[in-house]
Amino acid sequence: MLQVRELSKTYDKTPAVSGVSFDVKGGELAVLLGPNGAGKSTTIKCIIGLLNHEGEVRIDGHPGKSLEAKRKFGYVPETPALYDMLTVWEHLEFIAHAYSLKDWKERGEALLTRLDLWDKKDKLGKELSKGMQQKVSICCALLPEPRVIFFDEPMIGLDPKAIKELKLMFAELRESGASLLVSTHIIDSMEGLWDRALVMKAGHVLFSGTQGEVERSEEKLEDIFFRLTEGGVQ
Ligand code: ADP
Ligand code: MG
């Protein structure tokens, strides 16, 4: 369960996120939509404690910056940040040590195999393409079996097979009761996968609705998105 209340962030006096509040329950996937610069990445970075901010965040009931919260969440950043001189497998070993994981190797192998990385396990971070780095980043985030997971534009740079696999993973994670927050500026990429949609523009959440609410409304999510995000700042 993720709870965000009145989250605000200002970069050098310029507001980037203003008064954002939402919940993502266990077993729910919330899609965070918005054009470039809307504040999606900033929102996620604030929630996970990478950026100082105003407002309150609770991850599985724990304050966002607490160690308990950190143990519970996984984060796949917009741009993968791997270690140049660690191999793919050593990245997983590093995570396993950091989280004091036990009996993780089978799970690590299964994750790498699923994303076609098993035969690359001895390759160094710096030898991987952007897409491969993105896949390693996903494996690292999922290895500790997080209960709340943040994916920032996760499809960018992935090949079609990996996108298909990632979508299956989203469905399985939802099924397992995890809370997922997935940001994207490509609306159709998450079709049929979300329970709640949040539309952001210029740091504000302009729309928040469940799948059922959108289905019952006159408009499709895409229409809502364009109505709210096109034109000047609201
Ligand atoms: P999104 O992920 O939706 O594309 P961002 O959260 O990256 O949007 O950016 C939101 C706003 O904050 C933009 O106006 C962007 O220029 C600004 N911004 C993002 N990162 C920084 C930073 N490190 N310093 C100053 N401004 C930033
Ligand atoms: Mg972004």
Image (cartoon, helix red, strand yellow):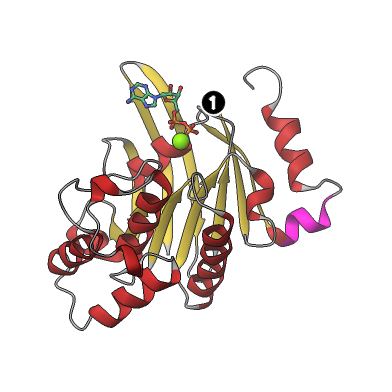
Q: Which residue is mark 1?
A: 202
Q: Quadrant of residue 229?
A: top right
Say which of 231 and 130 sits in front.
Answer: 130
Is residue 60 visible in the rendered structure shown here?
A: no
Say which of 161 and 173 sits in front.
Answer: 161
In the visual, does 54 lie left or right of 181?
left
Residue at 14% x, 72% y: name it: 100
The residue positioned farthest toward the right in the image shown: 218
Q: Position of residue 82 (x, y in %)?
A: 25, 48
Q: Position of residue 97 (x, y in %)?
A: 12, 68
**Span highlighted in magenta in the image:** 212-217
Looking at the picture, does residue 180 appear above or below residue 145? above
Looking at the picture, does residue 182 appear above or below residue 180? above
Is residue 214 located in the magenta-colored stretch of the structure? Answer: yes
In the visual, does 202 lie left or right of 47?
right
Q: In the rendered view of the protein, which quadrant contains the N terminus?
A: bottom left
Residue at 18% x, 62% y: name it: 90
In the visual, does 66 lie left or right of 76?
left
Q: Position of residue 162 (x, y in %)?
A: 51, 60
Residue at 55% x, 44% y: name it: 184
Total marks placed: 1
In the visual, does 215 lie left or right of 184?
right
Ligand 1's quadrant is top left
Task: Report if the beta carbon of the residue with label 1 is closer than 8 angstroms to ligand 1.
Answer: yes
Is residue 198 visible in the rendered structure shown here?
A: yes
Q: Mark 1 packing: few (<14 Cα in 10 Å), some, or many (20+)?
A: many
Is residue 39 located in the magenta-colored stretch of the structure? Answer: no
Q: Position of residue 3 (x, y in %)?
A: 42, 55
Tell me the amino acid under the disc marked 1: Ala
Magenta-colored segment: predominant secondary structure: helix
Q: In the rendered view of the protein, which quadrant contains the C terminus?
A: top right
